Image (spheres, rainbow, N blue to C red):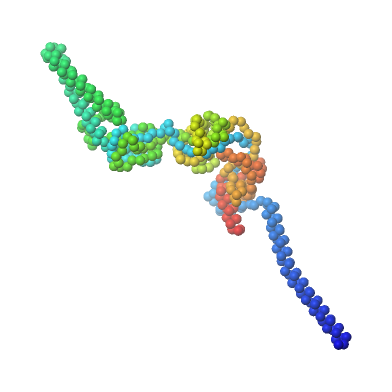
């Protein structure tokens, strides 16, 4: 082999190796470069998440139509020491009546319905009782016999004084009079014992039209509201049956469950603040008027009773309530926010700080103690900032929609 041809072949092989090396290098550069770019973008995104940059909600004017927004200014003030407790609302049992007939009878008309406001003496139902009819009949008969024997006795007494009649006839008339008087009084008392008033008894007469002697009304014994009705038309009920329950709801009882460890701190006369879900942001105030002497062994609580005026009947028996028993003394000043402003989003407590009408900053906060209306803010807010109370739930729904749309 000649040297020129050998050098040419060697040069060709070297040039080929160089081309292969450059090709591989270029391919490796093209593969690695996008990966480096993606990592940079990812790091940038992570940095943005960790920066905690505030998120703002902008609500267009048309979306605000029909929405009521209210704000509250954050301020620092004393946060009172208190004991929280669950509570239930009950009727005032001192102003409650279970109505039953004093005698067995059949229901022929029901005039009262659930929720109706009734007055003392108002007829709630009309009853028919064979026993009552018999007692009224006996009363009228005894009344007639007594009147006849009384007139005869008066006549015989006058004749005896004038010595026109004998002593025996006079004494016989006197005996019949006394006997009929006793029968009349017994019949009268029998009617009174089954619930008839003196006026009702005086009105009993054979000539009463359209009202059989066996009919009698079941009436309310107090002014109040019918909260229970258990009778139906045609039903036979006895004095053991509870036909109606009438309650005066102008005041209600709030029964607090005070845990055993808090018993020593709770006193009769302590101020209590009550909140219910039906009236968010509203507080009802009262004082403890009774503390039970018996501990419930199952719940380890005692009952504390608070009486609350309820003139508009807004608080209804059966409602669940939250109570805060205010302890004596004032606590140190703290930054407080209304509970109505605090919303839970993704296991975090947030508030909506108003920057201007329609623009709200979503701010995460840390809450320490809570009262029925306020929470103590440890982090996330400053004095003078305005947070949305009424309308905060609406802003929360907008925020959640954004998160779902972004996901």
Q: How many marks?
A: 0
Asked if residue 389 is positioned above or below residue 25 in the image, the reply reads above
| Residue 276 visible in this rendered orientation of the protein | yes
Asked if residue 162 is positioned above or below residue 363 in the image, the reply reads above
Asked if residue 309 is positioned above or below residue 357 in the image, the reply reads above
Q: Nearer the viewer, residue 372 or 5?
A: 5
Image coordinates for residue 386, horizontal then vertical, percent: 62, 44
Image coordinates for residue 293, horizontal then vertical, percent: 50, 30
Q: Is residue 249 left or right of residue 345?
A: left
Q: Is residue 27 left or right of residue 336?
A: right
Q: Quadrant of residue 333?
A: top right
- Identified at 64% across, 38% down, the residue is 334
- Identified at 15% across, 18% down, the residue is 172
Image coordinates for residue 69, horizontal then vertical, percent: 56, 46
**The C terminus: image quadrant:** bottom right
- Identified at 61% across, 48% down, the residue is 348
| Residue 70 visible in this rendered orientation of the protein | no
The residue lying furthest to the front in this view is: 297
- Identified at 84% across, 81% down, the residue is 11
Image coordinates for residue 259, horizontal then vertical, percent: 54, 36
**The N terminus: image quadrant:** bottom right
Asked if residue 277 is positioned above or below residue 251 in the image, the reply reads below
Q: Is residue 19 left or right of residue 393?
A: right
The residue lying furthest to the bottom in this view is: 1
Q: Quadrant of residue 208?
A: top left
């Amino acid at each position: 082999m000649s040297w020129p041809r050998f050098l040419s072949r060697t040069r060709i092989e070297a040039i080929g190796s160089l081309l292969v090396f450059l090709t591989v290098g270029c391919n490796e550069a093209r593969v690695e470069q996008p990966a480096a770019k993606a990592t940079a973008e990812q790091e940038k995104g992570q940095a943005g998440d960790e920066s905690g940059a505030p998120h703002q909600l902008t609500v267009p004017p048309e979306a605000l139509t029909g929405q009521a927004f209210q704000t509250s200014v954050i301020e620092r003030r004393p946060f009172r020491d208190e004991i929280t407790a669950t509570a239930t609302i009950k009727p005032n049992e001192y102003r409650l009546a279970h109505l039953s007939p004093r005698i067995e009878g059949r229901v022929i008309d029901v005039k009262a319905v659930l929720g109706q406001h009734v007055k003392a003496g108002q007829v709630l139902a009309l009853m028919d009782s064979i026993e009552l009819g018999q007692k009224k009949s006996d009363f009228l008969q005894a009344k007639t016999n007594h009147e006849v024997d009384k007139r005869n006795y008066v006549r015989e007494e006058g004749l005896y004084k004038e010595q026109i009649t004998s002593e025996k006839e006079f004494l016989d008339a006197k005996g019949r009079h006394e006997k009929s008087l006793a029968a009349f009084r017994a019949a009268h008392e029998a009617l009174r014992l089954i619930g008839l008033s003196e006026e009702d008894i005086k009105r009993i007469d054979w000539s009463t039209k359209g009202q059989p002697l066996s009919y009698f009304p079941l009436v309310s014994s107090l002014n109040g509201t019918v909260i229970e009705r258990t009778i139906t038309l045609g039903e036979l009920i006895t004095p053991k049956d509870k036909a109606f329950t009438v309650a005066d709801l102008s005041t209600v009882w709030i029964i607090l469950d005070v845990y055993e460890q808090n018993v020593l701190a709770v006193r009769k006369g302590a101020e209590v603040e009550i909140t219910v879900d039906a009236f968010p942001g509203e507080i009802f105030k009262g004082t403890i008027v009774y503390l039970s002497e018996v501990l419930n062994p199952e719940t380890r609580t005692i009952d504390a009773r608070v009486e609350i005026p309820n003139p508009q009947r807004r608080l209804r028996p059966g409602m669940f309530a939250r109570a805060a028993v205010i302890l004596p003394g004032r606590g140190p000043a703290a930054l407080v926010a209304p509970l109505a402003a605090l919303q839970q989003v993704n296991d975090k407590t947030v508030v909506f700080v108003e920057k201007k009408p329609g623009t709200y900053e979503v701010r995460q906060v840390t809450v320490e103690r809570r009262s029925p209306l306020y929470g103590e803010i440890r982090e996330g807010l400053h004095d003078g900032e305005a947070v949305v109370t009424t309308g905060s739930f609406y802003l929360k729904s907008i925020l959640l929609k954004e998160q779902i749309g972004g996901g």
